Image (tube, rainbow, N blue to C red):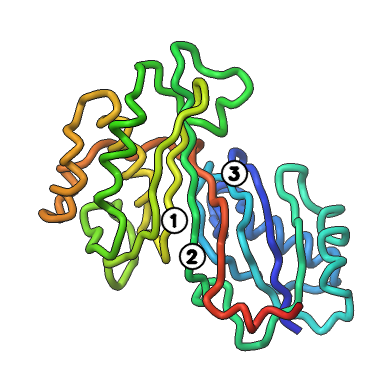
Amino acid sequence: MRILLTVAYRGTNYSGWQWQENGPSIQQELEKALEKALGKFVRVTGASRTDAGVHALCQRAQFDTDMKIPPERYPFVLNRHLPPDIRVINGQQVDDLFHARFMAEKKIYTYRIHNAPVASAIRYDTTAHVPVHLDERKMHDAVQCIVGTHDFAAFVASGGSQKTTVRTLYSASVTREGEEITFTVCGNAFLYNMVRIIAGTLIYIGQGKLPPECLQQALETGSRLDLGITAPAQGLELTYVGFREECHVHP
């Protein structure tokens, strides 16, 4: 049967979701844990390929097995073999036609900025530190122009393998609570480093280094030069993955 896992992890110590030759990955750790639990190797397919240092609250990943372990037991079975910064929080059976990557229709990413003169000693690896005051209202207003269906050719880093740069964003917001500024974006899919490029541009807008209109200009020109930096990986979190065909997920 095909099992769908919900996985949370702190990405600080990993080279990303996908197998890498140059360091440990989340996929590698999950597959090692499954091999210990099931007695044989099984391949895990994730819904999103998070980069090195990026975190997740709700990564979704599938694998096939002929073992008769009840799906809801997989958190208990796998967490015994996983490092403490990777946790399986749910397991469920899905149809054989289900595909975690291709059936994902909604992803929510969160980017967190610690906006204070001194960096946090506690959250240094889960937030990006910006010591200069940011205007979160200006950032929020500026980012509204990217909501909708657009060609985001300017918002992708070199090395991406996408067939098209057209994406649909359902919502985007910037809020502040004390010293933490949170950028949240929901869309059907995202390009390589797209969220970090938007976040870095918003940081520049919040500092007054770029005009708020630069995001709209980049949509029109397709030029990466119209945008700001690629924000550091540690501020980014995959917050949620939802599926197009929930009927394939067994109750």
What residue is pinned by disc 1?
A: 186
Question: Picture coordinates of residue 219 (x, y %)?
Answer: 18, 54
Name the quadrant containing residue 46.
bottom right
**Marker disc for residue 106:** 2
Circle 1 Cα neighbour tier, 10 Å, few/some/many (<14 / 14–19 / ≥20): many
x 43%, y 40%: residue: 183
Tag 3 secondary structure: helix
Circle 3 Cα neighbour tier, 10 Å, few/some/many (<14 / 14–19 / ≥20): many
**Marker disc for residue 18:** none
Q: Are marks 1 and 2 in contact (CB under 8 Å)?
A: yes
Image height check: is 212 above or below 224? above
Q: Are marks 1 and 3 in contact (CB under 8 Å)?
A: no
Q: Between disc 1 and disc 2, whose residue precedes?
A: 2
Image height check: is 77 above or below 145? below
Question: Picture coordinates of residue 22 (x, y %)?
Answer: 53, 49
Q: Quadrant of the N terminus?
A: bottom right
Question: Picture coordinates of residue 20 (x, y %)?
Answer: 54, 56
Question: Picture coordinates of residue 50 (x, y %)?
Answer: 51, 54
x 56%, y 66%: residue: 242
Q: CA distance from mark 2 to mark 3?
A: 21 Å
Q: CA distance from mark 1 to mark 3?
A: 21 Å
Amino acid identity at mark 1:
Cys
Amino acid identity at mark 3:
Gly
Circle 2 Cα neighbour tier, 10 Å, few/some/many (<14 / 14–19 / ≥20): some
Name the quadrant containing residue 27.
bottom right
1 or 3: mark nearer the eye: 1
